[in-house]
Every structure is written in structure tokens, then in C-alpha cells.
Image: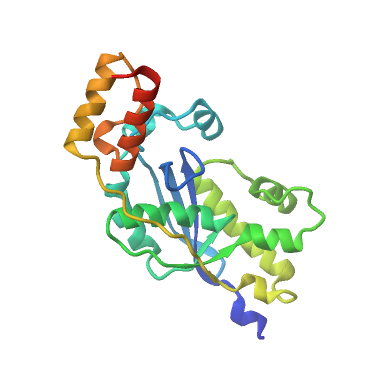
Amino acid sequence: MDPQSCRPNSYVSLDLETSGLNPKLDKIIEIGAVKVRQGEVCEKFTTLVNPGLTLSEHTLAITGITQAQVDAAPEIDTVLPDLLAFLEGEILVGHKVLFDYSFVKKAAVNLGERFERTGIDTLRIARACLLQLPKKTLGSVCEYYGIPLQAHRALEDARATALVLEHLWEDFGEKYPQLFEPKSLCFKAKKDAKATVAQKEQLSRLIQNHSLELGVDISMLSRSEASRWIAQILQAYGR
């Protein structure tokens, strides 16, 4: 195998901040991506995203993003077409790239779009090559390579991940070129149906009857999300 044939000379490094870790339940709150050609960033994509819910104190603390910022941001349905256009035909790079891919694919499926990609995982490469590091987090690998990092902001993490990939290639590309081959990214996602009018009305009544604050935008709920909220309220408070 010719090592140069595996050199990742054209790709997009993608990073997301999310409300939680489950792409089937949680939401994207920030997107950052950098397009790299021959090792140099040539284009950037960044936006906050309104998730339609109140962020946890943990999420607010680690990202530094405020509730007011996401409340004022566009919703994912508005943002996604531009993101998909930015990613069109590109290899995806990420530190645990399947995580970011799964959230984008879930959002794409909900809009009736296909999103199939190949990707390169810098976490996988670091685990195989940087055995001396006790942790292989993006922060740890950046510290090892002397890469400045403002962690847990999407564009900054995407930029840093691209630099990590370049360093890893320089150190290990010739010895382990197979680690840098793009792999098919696999995540199964089903389209979420929007909550019905009846569900929204029932949930609104329950919230009013029990003087509750759910921290979610009812108009943005899926059918399954609305069902979960209704069931939880009924179990806890009754009708």
C-alpha cells in the first residue's frame, strides 16, 4: 500500500456541542466545521442551534453557551441544508467521529434527507498510536502536540481536531497508513413524526393543570417525545 494514497489531503473536520449524548433523544446546540485542503483550512462553518429545550446546568457550564444564545439561534431545520451543502462529498474527520455523524444523520433523516459518509476517527488513531498517553481525549492529545484548545466549543474543537490529524499523519502515516483510510460511518436512524395536535393540547393542559415548567418548546416536540412527557406527567401527578 502506498502511504501517500491514504494521506487525508481533503476533508471536513466536524464537531458538535449537544444537549446530551443520545442522538435519538438529545439535540444539537452548536455546529463547527472546517474544510481542509492540503493541510490548510480553506473554509469554515459555524452556528448555534436552538434545541427547543432548556439546557442542563452541566451543559451550560462546560460549553459556556448561554440559554439566551441558543434561544435566539435558528432551529436545526433551518441550519441543516447549509450544513449538508458544506459537507457534500467530503470525508468527515472527528475525535470520535461517529458521535457527531450520528447527530447530523438523525437531523437529516428527520428532514427526509440521506446522509451517508465515510470518516476518519482521530480518537481511534490516537488509541492505536499514542500508547504512552493515559487519556486520549481531544484535550489530552492537543496538550501532547502543543495545540492550543478552547475545549467544548464546536468550531474550536473542529479546528483542533484537524491539526491533530495532521500531526498524527506526520508521526504515524507511513508506518500505519491503514489507520488513516476513511471508513464507512454506520448509524441507523428513523424519521421522527411531529407531535399531533391532540398530543400538544393534552400536554399543554397537563402543564397548566399542574403548574409545571418542562423547559421544552411543545411546538418542536416529536410524537415520541410528546408521548414520553405525557406519560411521565401522568405517572407523577395524575390528570
User: In the rendered view, would you say 120 is above or below 196?
Assistant: below
- Report the number of discs: 0
Q: Please identify the residue farthest to the right as the structure is shown.
A: 132
Q: Position of residue 80 (x, y in %)?
A: 32, 53
Give the colouring mode of the picture.
Answer: rainbow
Q: Please identify the residue farthest to the bottom as the structure is shown.
A: 1
Left or right: 102, with 163 as reference point: left
Q: Which of the 4 image quarters holds residue 165? A: bottom right
Q: Which of the 4 image quarters holds residue 163? A: bottom right
Q: Which of the 4 image quarters holds residue 67? A: top left
Image quarter hosting the N terminus:
bottom right
Q: Position of residue 53 (x, y in %)?
A: 36, 32
Query: In this orientation, does residue 140 appear?
Result: yes
Which residue is at 40% across, 20% downward? 236
Query: In this orientation, does residue 36 appear?
Result: no
Q: Please identify the residue farthest to the left as the structure is shown.
A: 197
Q: Nearer the viewer, residue 223 or 137?
A: 223
Which residue is at 52% across, 35% downward? 63
Q: Position of residue 227 (x, y in %)?
A: 32, 36
Which residue is at 74% across, 67% downward? 171
Image quarter hosting the C terminus:
top left
Q: Position of residue 195 (x, y in %)?
A: 24, 40
